[in-house]
Structures are given as C-alpha cells and as structure tokens.
Amino acid sequence: MSVSVKLENITKRFKAPGGSSIVAVDDLSLSIEKGSFVTLLGPSGCGKTTTLRVVAGFENPDTGRVFIDGIDITQVPPNKRNLAMVFQSYALFPHLNVFDNVAYSLKIRKSSPEEIQEKVTKVLDLVNMLGTEKRYPNQLSGGQQQRVALARAIVLQPKVLLFDEPLSNLDAKLREDMRERIRMLQQKLGITALYVTHDQIEAITMSDVIVIINEGRIEQIGSPTDVYERPSSRFVADFIGNVNLLEANLVNTVPDGIVLDLFGEKAKITSFSASSPKMYIAIRPEMVELLPAKDFPGLVFNGRILKSIYVGQHVEYTIKLNAGPTIMAVKLGNLSTLSNGDEVKVGFKFDTLHAIPS
C-alpha cells in the first residue's frame, strides 16, 4: 500500500499579542497510507485542526512540506489539490437546495448537465438522501445536513477526504449513526480520510490509525488497540479513556520484560513503552478484577469500596487500596454483594498491565 499523504517537518506559528508567537504545530512529520482512515486526536489547542488546514491549503506552514501521492503541493492553492473537506458547521449554501448544494462544485468545473445529474444522484443515494433534492438546508435535520455536506465533498471523487470535527454539533444518537455511515462510506469508496476530533470514542471506533497530538507534537501513532492498551506516555494513557496509573519502581530487566515493585509486590511486565527507575503501571478500570479466585494469575490487594455508581450496563466502583492509592473498577452487571464501605479484594492480571516511564 503506497503513501497517499505525507507531512514532512511541518511547523506553523501564529502571532500572539505583544509581538511574540505561538507554535501551533511543531516539526510534525506523518505518513498516511492510501485508502486508510487516520484520525488526529488531542485536546483543544493541541494543533490538530491547524495540521488539517495545512493539508487542505488553508494555512501555509512556516517550514516543512506537504505531499500528495509523492507530489509536493505545499504551494498549491486549496482548489487545485483535489481534496475535499467536511466542516463542523456543514457550510451548506442556505439559498441553494440539496441538489444544487451537491452540484455546486461540478457546475464550477463546467460539467455537463447529464454528468451532474448522474453524479449527484449517485452520491445522494450513497448517503441515503435521495428524495430530498428540492429541500433547502433549513428544512433538514442536523444529521441530514451533515449527509448532504458529505455528499458534496465526495461528488468530485477527491484523492483525500478531510474532516474537521464534523459530528460535534449532533446529539449522541445521531453521532453514533454518522460514525458508522462515514466509516462505511470511506471503506466502500476506498478513499483516504484524515479526520480531526477530540472525541475518543469517534477515534477508536472509526480509525485504522490514531495520531495523538499534544502541544503541536505527535505523542503516539498506532491502531486503536495500540493507543488504548499500550499507551506510550502518561499523557496518552490519561487522555484515552479512563485509566489507573500506579507508581512502581524498576527492580530489574529480564529477557522478556521488566520486573517492577508495586506496593511491595513484584510484578513481571511484558508490555511497556520504555523502562526507567520510576514507572507507572497503567491498568484500565474494566480490567480490574473484584473478588478474584485463589489461583488468580496476578497481583491481589485488599481495599475498601468508597463509592459505587450504577450506569445501567455496568457499575463504576471507586476503591481505596490498603496499600495507598484510590483506583477505579468497572464491572458489567451489578455485583449486588458489594456495597459502599465493604472490604474487597482487588486483582490485577499480569497480562492486562502496561508500564510507562514516569
């Protein structure tokens, strides 16, 4: 599979009050495979949208280059890059109906009426919006407007489809529906997609690759499984979902892993991003075992339940370990035998532990 988009040492600064400058993107390099769905994920102000706008041509980098299919497009204007963007605000023309909104770029290219009719009909069918051609944006729901915006973006068959937080204005149910629709459409068309969001669920459920960005730099690149189960840093572990981070000390290194001291107990860890004298052991709340069996393959500690919250499909427990820290545990169903104030045994399976340097 060949590279579709390549960012090479991109830096972008913006002027700040007083004459200083803010570095939005800091020497960022990234390669995106053709036909893949790649998400830029990070907190507000981390540089992900600026990176997307550099790819689109809306921002010129101070240093670095942008390539599409091996061709340097850094100085190419946005309308010549054969890219399309789906915006958070939909950006539909309010005075044009659905058909004319989708057909707009084709008319700019002076396509024939027959070609316009054929292509617009085809993409409206793809996004399940046939029959709405004569409606105006104010006659559509938010989800319908987003589907029209998606149809308008793909009608030109761009090489790369860019998404700038396209679902943030939709309610939870519509977001879930649009996540599935966008991913299905991207796979069906085989188009390369670069998607920006701060929503971890969107990133994990839609992406082939997630790029975690923090303060303009890439913290980690990996599959959803990689960044969730094997975070490379405390920032990534903390940003993706909920996590328990437990301070541990390095005892020694062995051929197939490292041995850490956690609250006086030795733990052999085979999953770790790097080693240092001081470490954090990361374990997700859903991986914490409550009331483990006697032959449990891991570490077992005593604790006390401080709080339990019933959330329908699961219960969230806050537990104070006798060894010191407070941890979270998430269990499917309701462990009705456990109540606030109860003493409880907590288990950490060795194969669910991942270590990162502190």
Image: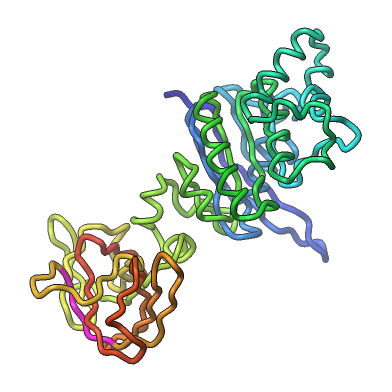
> What is the image's colouring?
rainbow
Q: Where is residue 312 in the image (x, y as percent from the top left)?
A: 44, 68
- Which quarter of the rendering shows the C terminus? bottom left
Q: Is residue 29 visible?
A: no
| The magenta segment | 298-303
Q: Position of residue 347 (x, y in %)?
A: 22, 74
Q: Which residue corresponds to the image point at 28% horizontal and 59% vertical from the top-left? A: 272
Rendered position, 134 above or below 344: above
Q: Is residue 3 visible?
A: yes
Give the farthest residue toward the right.
95
Q: Nearer the viewer, residue 43 or 110?
A: 110
Q: Which of 62 and 291 is in front in this view?
A: 291
Q: Which residue corresponds to the image point at 56% horizontal and 34% vertical from the top-left? A: 193
Rendered position, 173 above or below 137: below
- Using residue 237 as the reference point, say whether residue 54 is left or right of it: right
Give the farthest residue toward the bottom.
341
- Which quarter of the rendering shows the N terminus? top left
- Using residue 102 as the reference point, say whether residue 232 is left or right of it: left
Magenta part, dominant SS = strand
Rendered position, 292 above or below 275: below
Q: Quadrant of residue 214?
A: bottom right
Q: Position of residue 15 (x, y in %)?
A: 78, 56
Instruction: Indicate yes or no whether the magenta region holds residue 144.
Output: no
Q: Position of residue 258 (x, y in %)?
A: 19, 63
**Number of numbered discs present?**
0
Q: Nearer the viewer, residue 296 or 265?
A: 296
